[in-house]
Image (cartoon, coloured by chain):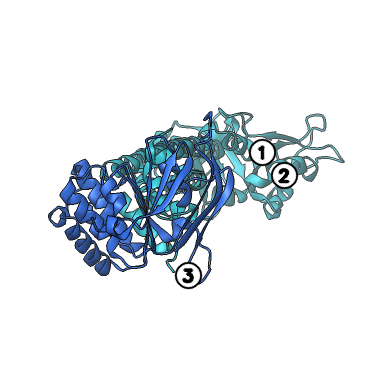
Chain colours: A cyan, B blue
Amino acid sequence: MTAPWPTRLAMREGLASALSSWGQSIMVIAATTYLMVGIGLANALDVSALAAAEREWIDAGGYAFIVEPASADGGALSVGACEQLSAVDGIVGSFAVSISDRAAYPSSAPGTQATWVQVSPGIYQFFGLSAQSSADVIVTAGIVDDIGLTDGEYTVMTVTSYDGTGTVRSAPVSVTTVDSPVLGDAIAGAYLSPELVSGDAQQCYVLTDAPHVDTIGAYLAAALATGSTAPAVVQPRLSANTYGLDFATVYGERVLGWAWTAGSLALVALWGALQFGRRTRMAIYATFGAHSRARLTMQLTEWVTLTGIGVVWGWAIGVTLAIGLGADIRIALAQVTMQIVAAWGAASIGAVLWGLSPVGTLLDALKDRN
Amino acid sequence: MRLTAGDLVFRYPGGDHDVLAGLSCDIPSGASVAIVGPSGSGKTTLLSLLGGLLRPQQGAFECVDVDGSRHVPRDVSTWVLQTVSLLPERSVIDNVCLGAYLDGADTAIARDRAHARLSDMGLADRAQEPARVLSGGEAQRVAIARALASDRPVLFADEPTGQLDAVTTDRVLDAMFAAANRTVVLVTHDGSAASRCDLVLRLTDGVLVADAPIAPQERAR
């Protein structure tokens, strides 16, 4: 006896429908492509902007603390205790700072005196630099431009008393630059000499990773307690940013993050309108024994064929445009892919539900009694 | 395939009267049956109930093969509908092939069968054209060719010759009745078409008023 609608026949009819109704097919492909590009591109650019802001904030010291001795105590921080913090889980690096009453200038630029600050060698790990010798001077990139030296150059650095009346020493050093705004105002324009290995310090810079910011922030006061028990004063390097500090929350609350919902609803609406216009066609198939499963197979074959093309094009165009407009490559790939997969997945569920909905009384559809 | 209906009652949703009121009939396997009657008498409704396109509010119908097995009518039947029922954007040959595909035929066999049925209908030269360009009569013949391209054992036809001239009507009816053991149920206003059937069901206001076999000599005319 005749078997009711084999799956292969239903798939063949779905594919044939996609190929023969080319006007409608192009409309579905174009709409899918447009929607996928729109939601993917918008999110890639939005998240890239957020990530750039976060990166900028981190580079400026968003995860850094400056620890100073308790003012009431009048004591100093231990250089050794500050240096040892880098061994603590969650701390990227730490270094101690001792601001001297001396000034210094390079032989190539006499008259450009700046404060001579001793820092502990942990500064190399703090900034991710390869360690040099103590015969080194570390300066911020902006200062290097002012004194006409470049990274890796050698010069003779003359250290004097702060009023410039007496030379303390004069020795050749290599120049290492740090292109970071993380240093506080007190030392940002100074010459930093990584020769502080013991004794007391006035500040301790601590850099943490993102997950441990709060834990480390609470830990430092006791870890660097001065005198007998007076807790150290711990201050975040930056107190605020344009997004209100919590980038994770901002990311999670992005309205654009739900763009896939709007995209999927639009796609389902388009598909529903198309299928409503084709209900007579479905009724014709139904008279030949195409039950709900066969009709669903037919519709989904066409759905996958047409929207699949649109999704692939949309993904490729979305990623390309996002990167071309300056989005981070990894973010562009991740955001465009996530949005498109979510939108297409949700829309596919909608297409299935539409395909399972009854076609109404067949005779009504066939005789257009509706 | 034998079709039986017992005490069928049907009313369209929102309707104010029963289109069919307690109708019973028995169509033997392999018989050809004409359902006749004035417009609005319930002919198409009865055909649709027998073919499973509608569900009655009361009563039952069965579709039973010679072994006594019951079948869902739509799984064992093909249709020629009163309204144009082709897939307009598909070619004529594609529309007709659908009938053969229902039997599990592969593409080559389906196309051979479709060409043969189109030749029977005098439309072999229109095979590659899209169905939307056909006239009403041509579309009706393509729908008949599609139904005949299938070997399904039941053929339901609603006014299959309504848009055809006398010569073409004879040609179409010859093809429809050619298959042995196929049960053919057709709704018609055409006396000559009805006269070629084994049995005539005459309806008036949803009631079966006559259930008469056609005399052989009358059929011969």
User: Residue under circle 1?
Assistant: A65
Category of crowding for the residue at label 3, using alpha-carbon neighbours closer than 10 angstroms: few (below 14), some (14–19), many (at least 20): few
Labels 2 and 1 positioned on one and the same chain: yes
Task: Report the chain holding disc 1.
Answer: A
What chain does mark 2 sit on? Answer: A
Question: Label 3, on which residue?
Answer: B66
Quadrant in which the N terminus of chain A is drawn: bottom left
Residue at image point 75% right, 39% down: A76
Amino acid at circle 2: Ile
Horizontal relation, residue A263 to residue B110: left or right? right
Q: Are marks 2 and 3 in contact (CB under 8 Å)?
A: no
Give the residue number, with chain letter if any, for mark 2: A216
**Looking at the picture, which amino acid does disc 1 mark?**
Phe
**Does residue A360 show up?**
no
Compare residues A111 and A346 and report the one nearer the observer: A346
Q: Is residue A163 visible?
A: yes
Q: Disc 2 or disc 3, which is closer to the eye?
A: 3
**Is A233 on the left or on the right of A280, as rendered?**
right
Q: Is A257 above or below relative to B169?
A: above
Secondary structure at numbered mark 1:
strand
Quick check: marks 2 and 1 in contact, CB under 8 Å? yes
- How busy is the neighbourhood of tag 2: few (under 14 within 10 Å), some, or many (20 plus)? many
Determine the CA span between mark 2 and mark 3.
Answer: 86 Å
Q: Chain of mark 3?
A: B
Viewed as shown, does residue A60 lie left or right of A298?
A: right
| Type of amino acid at the residue the image marks with label 3 | Val
Quadrant for residue A16, please give it. Answer: bottom left
Q: Nearer the viewer, mark 1 or mark 3?
A: 3
**Quadrant of the frame with the C terminus of chain A:** top left
Q: Is residue A279 above or below residue B200?
A: above
Q: Residue furthest right?
A: A228
